[in-house]
Image (cartoon, grey):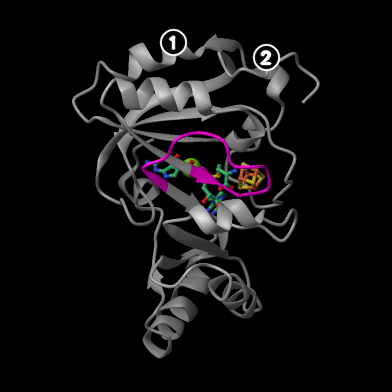
Amino acid sequence: MSKQVPADGTLLPLMEEFYTIQGEGYHTGKAAYFIRLGGCDVGCHWCDVKESWDAELHPLTKADDIIRNAARYPAKTVVITGGEPLIYNLDYLTRGLQDAGIKTFIETSGAYPLSGHWDWVCLSPKKFKAPLPDVIEAAGELKVIVFNKSDFEWAERYAAQIPVGRKLYLQPEWSKAAQMTPLIIDYVKENPKWEISLQTHKYLNIP
Ligand SMILES: C[S@@+](CC[C@H](N)C(=O)[O-])C[C@H]1O[C@@H](n2cnc3c(N)ncnc32)[C@H](O)[C@@H]1O
Ligand SMILES: Nc1nc2[nH]cc(C(=O)O)c2c(=O)[nH]1
Ligand code: SF4
Ligand SMILES: [Mg+2]
């Protein structure tokens, strides 16, 4: 983070915000306001939002303005994503959202320390930068992206670390979905503690 982002979380590099339907994971199908923060150094070669990586490209925006925008929509739920949102201190933003009666969900790789007040944490761990224990502990769902066959074994390593009872998802990497989805179907039939998560917004052609 070379850009001067204040440590108090009152200003955040905002790439985009949009009202849509959560496409993935446990909350699939629910309307939510998405807040996409710029900046990520995890480096997933298959990342579907590489335009987010350089924080400098995304204007520092008042958290108070983000909260005001979010409050305009009928669904009182936000999904904070990125980039990697946990690069930043999210205490101020999420406190303000919750005080406005808005539920706070996060999409994170877990590669940075947990900050913020969360109603739901979706942890999608990456080989390229391991998740931290406090995020593993807070995760309501573990969502592993399957890019090749070896990812099933890798997924089990994280399933063994996450507290019992948390939701477990296997999600095909989008460019490999045609090859990996049949393997995921077979794997879930053999290992029913896992469920399939699809990027349904991409099939629906919505943001
Ligand atoms: C773009 S990331 C941003 C949040 C955070 N950096 C993370 O990786 O969790 C949002 C979600 O999209 C998933 N994702 C990114 N690229 C994908 C792809 N090509 N196919 C399937 N899922 C992908 C990530 O694993 C994550 O669950
Ligand atoms: N509809 C929709 N659902 C999503 N779930 C996670 C997303 C993300 O990029 O973090 C995402 C996204 O970009 N769009
Ligand atoms: S951690 Fe998330 S935003 Fe960063 S490169 Fe990986 S998928 Fe993209
Ligand atoms: Mg996305």
Q: Quadrant of residue 191?
A: bottom left
Q: Residue furthest left?
A: 74
The amino acid sitting under disc 1 is: Asp
Q: Residues within 10 Å of mark 1 (few under 14, many from 20)?
A: some
Residue at x-position 67% and y-position 14%: 6
In the figure, is residue 68 to the left or right of 151? left
Q: Residues within 10 Å of mark 2 (few under 14, many from 20)?
A: few
Of residues 57 and 122, the one nearer the viewer is 122
The amino acid sitting under disc 2 is: Pro
Q: Considering the numbered disc 1 on the image, is that residue within a helix, a strand or a loop?
A: helix
Dominant SS type (magenta): loop
**x and y percent of residue 92 in the render?**
50, 21
Of residues 168 and 134, the one nearer the viewer is 134
* Residue 114 among magenta residues: yes
Residue at x-position 72% and y-position 27%: 54
Reading the image, the residue beneath label 2 is 6
Reading the image, the residue beneath label 1 is 64
**x and y percent of residue 108 in the render?**
55, 46
Q: Quadrant of residue 41?
A: top right
**x and y percent of residue 110 in the render?**
61, 49
- In this view, 56 is above or below 195: above
Of residues 97 and 1, the one nearer the viewer is 97
Q: Which label number is shown at residue 138?
A: none
**x and y percent of residue 159 in the render?**
53, 73
Q: CA distance from mark 1 to mark 2?
A: 14 Å
* Badge 1 vs badge 2, beta-carbon distance below 8 Å: no
Q: Considering the numbered disc 2 on the image, is that residue within a helix, a strand or a loop?
A: loop
Quadrant in the picture for the N terminus:
top right
- Please provide the residue range marked out in magenta: 107-120
In the figure, is residue 81 to the left or right of 74? right
Mark with earlier residue (1, 2) = 2
Residue at x-position 53% and y-position 67%: 162
